[in-house]
Amino acid sequence: MIKTTVKIDGMMCGMCEAHISDLIRKTFSDAKKVAVSRRKGEASFLTEKEPDAGILAEAITSMGYTCISMESVEYKKKRLFG
């Protein structure tokens, strides 16, 4: 699994968070655990393979927000007992 964190500028309310969450789910059909925070100015989600940064940045920009940066790292599920 790949965890992707995207820094986004322009989110002001809960509806902005919902719009970004819906956008991520529509853009990447395998996206899981989508979390968006306007306070932090970021969104994070899990996918099976690394998402295309250009496609996501273009989709975010088309909605009126600004994609500042995007980082993808390998995600290892944390176990209950180590």
Image: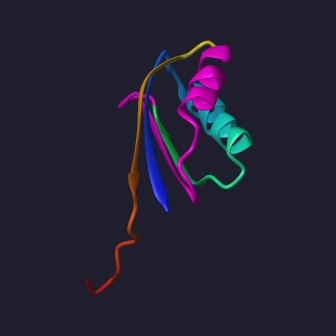
Please tell me in which quadrant of the rendered image residue 64 appears.
top right
Question: Where does the image place residue 48, in percent across and percent down from the top left?
Answer: 58, 60
Q: How many marks?
A: 0
At 46% from the left and 45% from the top, the residue drawn is 4
The x and y percentages for residue 33 are 54, 56
62 relative to 77 in the view: left or right:
right
Which residue is located at x 49 percent, y 15 percent? 10
Direction from residue 35 to residue 61 in the image, left or right: right
In the picture, which quadrant includes the C terminus?
Answer: bottom left
What residue is drawn where x is 68% and y is 34%?
A: 23
Residue 9 picture location, percent across and down? 44, 18
Q: In which quarter of the image is residue 63?
A: top right
Residue 19 lies in quadrant:
top right
The residue furthest left is 82
Residue drawn at 72 percent across, 50 percent down = 29
Q: Give the range drawn in magenta.
A: 38-63
Horizontally, residue 81 falls left or right of residue 10, namely left
Is residue 39 located in the magenta-colored stretch of the structure? yes
Colouring scheme, one of rainbow, by chain, secondary structure, one colour: rainbow
In this view, 7 is above or below 78: above
In the rendering, at what x and y percent does residue 68 appear? 42, 20
- Which residue is most to the bottom? 81
Q: Does the magenta stretch include residue 68?
A: no
